[in-house]
Image: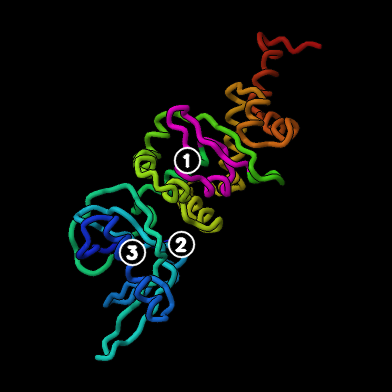
Amino acid sequence: MTLHLIKLCVGVDTVKELEGWIRQRLREKKKRGEKPEHVHTTRMVPKRAEELTDGGSLYWVVRGQVMCRQRLKAVRPFTDKNGIGRCRLVLEPKVVLVEPRPYRAFQGWRYLSAKDAPREVRTFCLVLHDTGCRISEALALTPRRFDLSGKAIVFETLKKRRRGIYRAVPVPESMLDTLNMVHGFTEAGKRRTGSKEETPLWDWSRMTAYRRVKEVMDAAGIANGPHKCPKGLHHGFGVHAISKGVPLNMLSKWMGHASLEVTAIYANALGEEQRSIAARMWEDGDRSP
């Protein structure tokens, strides 16, 4: 199961200052002819390195608030010139903003379980659940793809052979408010830096995203079965939409299907609806031929 670390960002007052410090360190390494990787050295060596490097991140507490994170790439124990054991945490240079939340001061680093991490994982699951998108389509989302005024999310349909095919899926306003609060679309738009607006919201591999969704489902107590996976959310969206009377042609567009025949599969899954229709023939005890 994915595990994270959390640590105070000493000597830094803002996320922007942290980003500038990282860029400076990388430039200095490049000038010295060293490998341009971002490394943070700590005294204590994490014993659960395998879990940390399985999609984990180092979350930074800046002035009493969890403000951002960097993906953990490697954990490298070493002994310094004084014979003291230390550890190099190799981090992805990119700093990812997270939903700010208060965190009391502490020394060193601490483990942070996936369920206690900021709400990025839950927003990812929310997008899958409320739009029926594929996991790869959600991972490709950037702040530009969220239409706050039109109350929709614009996906590139990645299952089709041709690129550049987009579809807009309407979503509840409350969902967009939650996503904006956690990921800061409005703030990214104000910066107008270009790169920020084109940075994916979730910097995970497809396998990491799959595991994180499964972890949420495990924590929710969902029974084992073929539905207990990201694809289960995709199919569940289709079945639920049909049960609520969404026309096949509209659902086909929302789900990015190539034809109505594919979408029609969800109509055949509604055993309960078929029983309800059949029950009309059984009313008043009239079952005569």
**Farthest residue in the right direction?**
289
Q: Amino acid at mark 1?
A: Arg
SS type, badge 2: loop
Residue range of the region highlighted in magenta in the rendering = 130-157
Dividing the image into 4 quarters, which one contains the N terminus?
bottom left
* 282 w.r.t. 123: above or below: above
| Residue 261, x across and y down, in percent | 75, 32
SS type, badge 1: helix
Q: Which mark is residue 144?
A: 1
Marks 1 and 3, Cα distance to the nearest angstrom?
30 Å
> In front here: 70 or 166?
166
| Residue 51, x across and y down, in percent | 43, 67
Q: Are marks 2 and 1 in contact (CB under 8 Å)?
A: no
10 Å crowding of disc 3: few (<14), some (14-19), many (20+): many
Q: Is residue 186 left or right of residue 273?
A: left
Q: Nearer the viewer, mark 2 or mark 1?
A: 1
| Residue 84, x across and y down, in percent | 26, 87
> In front here: 189 or 71?
189
Q: Earlier in the sequence, mark 2 or mark 3?
A: 3
- Picture quarter containing residue 36? bottom left
